[in-house]
Image (cartoon, rainbow, N blue to C red):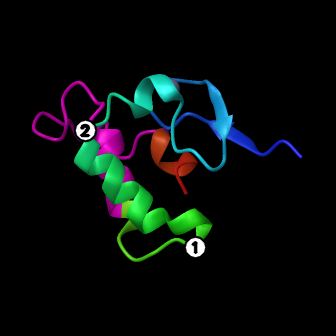
Amino acid sequence: MRDEHECTAPGCSKMVSTRMLMCRHHWYRVPAHLRNAVWKTWNNGKVQEGYRAARQAAIDSLAPQPRAKASPFRKHGPLLGRLI
Ligand SMILES: [Zn+2]
């Protein structure tokens, strides 16, 4: 039983447990309050309202330029499909 998926951090392809959003390296670069928000809404797999937003905020916190300079070409990047 090896349930793994790719780390959700931009550009990282490490395989991590499905119970974790990212590899350790990236997870600990996410600000603590965002990590807490992800844990709270994740609730051991019983995903709560707000989980997607919390997860996206965590992922965005690792992006070099979050939103401000987003070009139309990056709006629907390849990552989106993977995060569902
Ligand atoms: Zn990673």
Nearer to us in this view, 43 or 61: 43
Residue at 25%, 38% (x, y): give it.
Answer: 31
Q: Is residue 69 above or below residue 50?
A: above
Residue at 84%, 42% (x, y): give it.
Answer: 2
Residue behind mark 1: 46
Nearer to us in this view, 30 or 80: 30
Image-quadrant location for residue 16: top right
Mark 1: amino acid: Lys
Residue at 36%, 41% (x, y): give it.
Answer: 59
Image-quadrant location for residue 26: top left
Mark 2: amino acid: Pro
Tell me the crowding category of disc 1: few under 14, some 14 to 19, or many 20 or more residues within 10 angstroms, Cα based: few
What mark, if any, has residue 31 been given in the picture?
Answer: 2
Nearer to us in this view, 9 or 65: 9
Badge 1 element: loop
- Residue 10 in view in this figure: no
